Image (tube, rainbow, N blue to C red):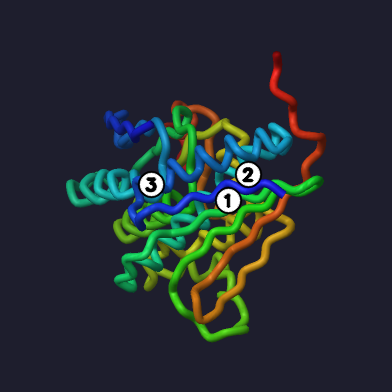
Amino acid sequence: MATVELRFSAQPEHVRTARLVAAAVARRAGVEEAVLDEVRLAVGEACSRAVGLHRSNGITAPVRVVLIEEEKLFSIEVGDELPGPAGAPADAVPGIEAVLDPDIEGEDEMGLAVISGLVDDVEVTSGEAGGTIRMTWPVARVSALPQS
Amino acid sequence: MDLSLSTRTVGDRTVVEVGGEIDVYTAPKLREQLVELVNDGSYHLVVDMERVDFLDSTGLGVLVGGLKRVRAHEGSLRLVCNQERILKIFRITGLTKVFPIHTTVEDAVNATD
C-alpha cells in the first residue's frame, strides 16, 4: 500500500493544489481517465468543506489529505480537526430544498451533496480528533510502469 | 488558473462571460460581480460558462445566490453551457430544474419563457 500525504493551511487558495495533487496521484495509481474529473471535483469539495470548518471555528491546524493506493482501489481521506461527538452519525447531506430556501444564503451547503452524487463509495466519520471523509474508487488496471 | 470575468449588454440582458476555475478561492469574485450587477439595476443576467474549466459547489452556491437576488427584482438568470462535465454537476445537485440552461448565448438572450 502506497500513500501520499498532503497537509495545507486552511486557506482557499490551497484547495486547487490539493485537487491537482490528488488527480496526479490518482492517474498514476491507474484510475481511469474518465473518472479523474470526478476525483478532482470530489477531493476539492471535501477540502473546501474542511477549510470552511477550520476557518469558521478558528482552527489553525492544517487540513490533511491522504491518498492511498492499493492493489485494486484508490482512496482519498480528507480530515478536518473539528472535534465531533465520537461515533455520531455523519452530517446529514443537505437537500436541494435547503439550498434553495430563500432564507439561507445557500453557498457551502452543497459540498456533501456533490460528493454523494459523484462517489459511490464514500464514508463520513466524526470523532474527538475531527472528521474524515473517505472516498474510494476502483482501479481498472495495474499502475503504469515508467516508460524507458 | 484564475477566474476571468467580463460583462456586456445585449438588449435588456447582461451577459457575464466567465472563464477559468470557479472554486472556493475564486467564487467570491463571481459573487461580487453578480451582486454589483444587481445593485446597478441589471436584473436579467446570462452567465456564459463555455470557458469554465472547473466548477464546484461553492460556484453553484454563488449562482443560486445570484438567482435569488435577481428573482427578488422579478429578474432572470440563465446559463449557457455545453460542457458535459459542468452540466453533470448541475444534474447531480438537481439544479437543472432551477436554472434555464441554454446551448448558445443567442438562445439565452432571446429566451422569454
Work out whether residue A147 can be spotted.
yes
Mark 2 element type: helix
Mark 3 element type: helix
**Place of residue A123 in the rendered image (x, y in percent of width and height, measured from the top left):** 67, 66
The residue where tag 2 is placed is: A38
Q: Nearer the viewer, residue A147 or B42?
A: A147
Q: Residues within 10 Å of mark 1 (few under 14, many from 20)?
A: many
Q: At 35% across and 55% down in the image, what residue appears?
A: A9
Where is residue A120, by image quadrant?
Answer: bottom right
The residue where tag 1 is placed is: A42
Quadrant of the drawing holding the C terminus of chain A: top right
The residue where tag 3 is placed is: A14
Type of amino acid at the residue the image marks with label 2: Glu
Where B7 falls versus A95 (above or below)? above
Q: At 58% across and 56% down in the image, what residue appears?
A: A114
CA–CA distance between discs 2 and 3? Answer: 19 Å
